[in-house]
Image (tube, rainbow, N blue to C red):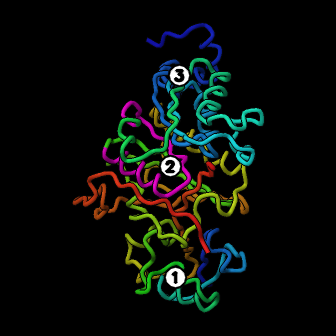
Amino acid sequence: MTDFTDEQVERYSRHIILPEVGGVGQRKLLDARVLLIGAGGLGSPAAYYLAAAGVGHLGIVDFDRVELSNLQRQILHSTERIGMLKTESARMTIQNLNPDVQVTTFNERLTSQNIRALFENYDYIVDGSDNFPTRFLINDACVFMNKVNIHGSIFRFEGQATVFQPKAGPCYRCLYPEPPPAGLVPNCQEGGVLGVLAGIIGNIQAVETLKLILGIGKPLTGSLLIYDALETEFRKLKLKRDVECAVCGEHPTITELVDYEEICGIS
Amino acid sequence: MPIKVRIPTPLMKLTNNQSELSAEGETIADMLNSLESQYAGIKERICEENGTPRRFINIYLNEEDIRFLDGEKTAIKDGDEVSIIPAIAGGLNG
């Protein structure tokens, strides 16, 4: 049974009256377990709306503290929380918004050593990380553990989003077999970003996560959504599984988690 | 009518900040040479020395990844749109 309190019926009334959600869907959201990698530019809007939607269990992995330069886009945090752990700041914001949400914080850096234990209790992984080693680690762990990876990334005025669903579609390595070498692709804090772009892409990740939990619509699985803020243009490109993919292909050669070296800097 | 090529943000400093270029040719390889003749240096950013696209850059003809067509030998025709899409890592956490 759906079994809501009066307060929940009121809080989620605009969901419950949607035929595609209803009481049954709202219950699915309240029972769902979503892990956010990063409480930064992408993780902030994603976590905020997932919490508002009543996703009942949110895990947040981040080892940073709030800095002034984060606040241009990281809307979970605030000026008075500069210096606070991002996980703790995220928990405060989310619980103020919606006490239904059980927030579990992991104040640590993702590595091949801890990732399995962190992913174990969650069904959906929202990748809001900011570097290639972490993205490849998340991808491989999701393939090995059969977790859905809701992917977003941003650079200056351009964003990308997709859903990697093991077996149902390609994985990150089907697109990009290996992390780029240093110096050829912008990485880390380079280049800047229009703050609100993180909001657009992070919220697309939130929408995809909600659709997947509810089992409605068509997820971005097998499509790469490209958003160009300057041209006000969305494009969808087709993604295919690579049968020769080293991790999810027919004859995988990567069968254990890999820690790549962090590469920063570009000429 | 030439082919429209969409240039990703990380490569726009090589194209005078233009996000869209016109190119000529009958294949993706021709198109890459056409880009190189307009903006010297761009091809080596997109391709390995042997002319295949780098592993962290994908080229799409209209909506399709050329790796699942004929690679750089994929035929192109007037009115096609080519997108060059590199991996981007940023979630801008830091």
The amino acid marked with disc number 1 is Lys
Q: Is residue A210 visible?
A: no
**Residue at (70, 59) in percent of width and height:** A192
Front residue of this view, candidates A13 and A166: A166
Q: Secondary structure at mark 3?
A: strand
Disc 3 marks which residue?
A: A102
Residue B81 figure quarter: bottom right
The region drawn magenta spans A119-144
Q: Is residue A138 magenta?
A: yes
- Against A95, residue A250 (above or below) is below
Q: Which percent across, then down, holds residue B54?
A: 45, 75
Q: Which percent across, then down, holds residue B3?
A: 59, 81
Residue A12 figure quarter: top right
Task: Give the spatial CA distance, label 1 vs label 2.
Answer: 33 Å
Q: Both on one chain, marks 3 and 2?
A: yes
Q: Is residue A145 magenta?
A: no
The amino acid marked with disc number 2 is His
Chain of the residue on which disc 2 is drawn: A
Q: Which percent across, then down, holds residue B69?
A: 38, 73
Task: Give the spatial CA distance, label 3 vs label 2.
Answer: 23 Å
Disc 1 marks which residue?
A: B77
Q: Secondary structure at mark 2?
A: strand
Residue B18 located left or right of residue A1: right
**Residue at (48, 55) in percent of width and height:** A223
Find the residue positioned furthest to the bottom: B37
From the image, which quarter does the N terminus of chain B lie in?
bottom right
Find the residue positioned furthest to the right: A79
Q: Secondary structure at mark 1?
A: loop
Disc 2 marks which residue?
A: A151
**Neighbourhood count class around disc 3 (C-alpha, 10 Å): few under 14, some 14–19, many 20 upward:** some
